[in-house]
């Protein structure tokens, strides 16, 4: 079974530039998550989608971050404009949906460095 | 904020059992305990979860105290590949509430 795919794996940009990350979840997984992981910290949930609808975006800095999941499959996270403090690993995860516990499967992440 | 407290780091000798503690004194009756781990440069990986009974799977065992205020993850025979950050998380169960709030975890270093 193919895992969660993310691209690019690494990205270096200058502050005030824009950047986009792409995620393709495991086939059939209705729920998709974007996390931000700053060095030395645990992942922090930015946004959760169920199919193509947003379930939770309370931690997403909406003045500069945006995310979409058109057609309920793959997803894009964008930062515009980037700040130095956005340097982090951006993780995408997916899970099934149902009444039982559904394990979250994580991708390898995209490491963003903002100079 | 994370609802759990874990030691920042632990060492374990290869082949020995690794016992990772977690305190969750404010856990509510309908919250489960979940464990994930994150190997360097990879995304987190699910290990195990439980409500109040002890649980075991092919990766680990989870021991939850009777008052549910703490738990221990046991890796019975640690290998070098078990070196990782281990996260203990309390959360509701299933469906759209499948939300994980990660703390800083415990860095387990398995020594040869």
Image: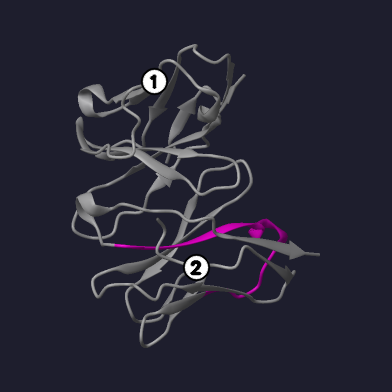
Q: Nearer the viewer, residue B69 or B12?
A: B69
- Position of residue A99 in the picture relative to residue A67 (left or right): left
- The residue indicated by pointer 1 is A78
Q: Nearer the viewer, residue A74 or B92?
A: B92
- Give the residue at x 61% y 41%: B41
Mark-to-mark CA distance, 1 and 2: 33 Å
- The residue indicated by pointer 2 is B5
- Magenta-drawn stretch contains A8: no
- Give the residue at x 21% y 49%: B96
* Most distant residue in the right direction: B112
Secondary structure category for the residue under label 2: loop
- Above or below residue B4? Residue B104 is above
Q: Are marks 1 and 2 on the same chain?
A: no
Q: Residues within 10 Å of mark 1 (few under 14, many from 20)?
A: some
Residue A40 location, x and y as percent?
60, 47
Residue A54 location, x and y as percent?
21, 34
User: Which residues are the magenta region?
Assistant: B73-91
Mark 1 and mark 2 in contact? Answer it, CB < 8 Å: no
- Give the residue at x 43% y 65%: B48
Give the label, 1 or 2, closer to the camera. Answer: 2
Residue A98 location, x and y as percent?
19, 53
Q: Quadrant of residue B8?
A: bottom right
Secondary structure category for the residue under label 1: strand
* Most distant residue in the top direction: A17
- Give the residue at x 59% y 68%: B7
């Amino acid at each position: 079974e193919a895992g969660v795919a993310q691209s690019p794996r690494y990205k270096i940009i200058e502050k005030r530039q824009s950047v986009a990350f792409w995620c393709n979840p495991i086939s059939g997984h209705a729920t998709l998550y974007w996390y931000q992981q700053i060095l030395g910290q645990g992942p922090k949930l930015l946004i959760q989608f169920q199919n193509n609808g947003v379930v939770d975006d309370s931690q997403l800095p909406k003045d500069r971050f945006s995310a979409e999941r058109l057609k309920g499959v793959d997803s894009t996270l964008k930062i515009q404009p980037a700040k130095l403090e956005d340097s982090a690993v951006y993780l995408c995860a997916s899970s099934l949906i149902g009444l039982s516990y559904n394990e979250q499967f994580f991708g390898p992440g995209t490491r963003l460095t903002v100079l | 904020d994370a609802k759990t407290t874990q030691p920042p780091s632990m060492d374990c000798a290869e082949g020995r059992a690794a016992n990772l503690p977690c305190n969750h004194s404010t856990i509510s009756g309908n919250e489960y305990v979940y464990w994930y781990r994150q190997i360097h440069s990879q995304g987190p990986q699910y290990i195990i979860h439980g409500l109040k009974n002890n649980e075991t799977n092919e990766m680990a065992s989870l021991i939850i105290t009777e008052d549910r205020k703490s738990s221990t993850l046991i890796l019975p025979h640690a290998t070098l590949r078990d070196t990782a950050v281990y996260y203990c998380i309390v959360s509701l169960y299933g469906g759209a509430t499948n939300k994980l709030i990660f703390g800083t975890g415990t860095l387990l270093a398995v020594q040869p």
